[in-house]
Image (cartoon, coloured by chain):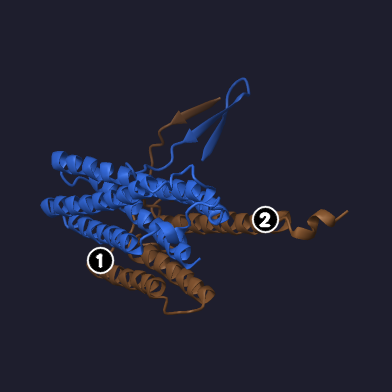
Amino acid sequence: MTVMTHSPDHSTGHSDHGHSDQGAHGSRKTYLIGFWLSVLLTAIPFYLVMSGIVQNKEATGVLLVAMAAVQIIVHMVCFLHMNSKSESGWTMMSLIFTVIIVGIVLSGSLWVMYHLNVNMMLSPDMSQMP
Amino acid sequence: MQTSVDTADNARIFYLKDEHDHAEGGSTMLGFWLYLMSDCLLFAILFATYGVLSTNYAAGPAPKDLFDLWTVALNTTMLLLSSITYGFAMLSADEGKQKSTQVWLIVTALFGLAFVGIELREFAHMIHEGATPQRSAFLSSFFALVSTHGLHVSFGIVWIVTLMVQVQLHGLVPANLRRLMCLSLFWHFLDIVWIGVFTFVYLMGMLR
């Protein structure tokens, strides 16, 4: 049997446990820094692909992914105001968890399905195999 | 915290002491952040699907035949501008300037509408050319991914209009500031997803 009561004293041991923070807020400066960095990190990939200035397509692809990753971090810090302290670190914990799961989902799917495609490919001499 | 009291018949009664008071909406931001993380998983699955199927053209059109990078660049600009104007709306709201908050919210909604409009025009153009979602696996996964993002932006615009009415009726009270903060996370999150879309779908598609 459980009885819920209102405890009369709130003074014991909870003084350091405020819930008043509504998330961090940025300043005009961080927003503008984030904006101009994003403009740069968006313009360069588009220029690379539209002009075809880098002949090697693999190298271009790597550059594109690298700049997307940097831009995502810029958005996280400047626009979403991510830090390790908000909500006692739980936002950062859940973000790390999500990034790990997303990594597993993406790399796992691509890896498994790539090998499936390669192994299921009908090559001309397949019909002669016993 | 629990306190057990022995009663006459020796049955134990547990008194659960109340936790300390939570401010109203004190856990909203963390909860909304967790929602965004689950939304992130949804997009991860759509990205993985697109990644697996992106070369299955079924002898149909390939990215090079369909995408116009100038349109995509224009779309990206719209979304990026709407991100910074939403940032300005948040700054005005923090300073308690109701009128300037409303103006920046309108500007953000207009940029959002421009984004959705350009995207719909692109879709209409593709479908007109016969590149419908049922044409090939590549197009199915393309439309699933990009239109899920577009749908999120559309609901974001509905949310902006709703909040503008709320702010007009009740002013910049703490509840409205909290809602604006949630929408801020949502709106910037959509811009982050769009970084993935324009990099992996459009730019990488044109490289193939």
Give the mark count. 2
First along the sequence among labels 2 and 1: 1
**Measured from the top left, where is residue B76 in percent x and y?**
32, 61
Position of residue B134 measured from the top left corner of the image (x, y, whole percent) = 49, 42
- In the rendered structure, which amino acid carries the disc numbered 2? Asn
Residue at x 46% of width, y 30% of height: A4
Picture coordinates of residue B58 (x, y %)?
55, 50
At horizontal 42% and vertical 67% (from top left) the residue drawn is A73
Q: Nearer the viewer, residue B18 or B32?
A: B32
Number of the label disc, if any, that sits on residue A27: 1
Local SS, label 2: helix
Which colour represents chain B? Answer: blue
The residue beneath circle 2 is A117
Going by the numbered disc 1, the residue's amino acid type is Ser
Return the residue nearer the eye: B83 or B13: B83
As measured in the structure, the alpha-carbon distance from the residue carrying label 2 to the one carrying label 1 is 50 Å
Secondary structure of the residue carrying numbered label 1: loop
Task: Give the answer, above or below, for where A111 lies relative to A59.
Answer: above
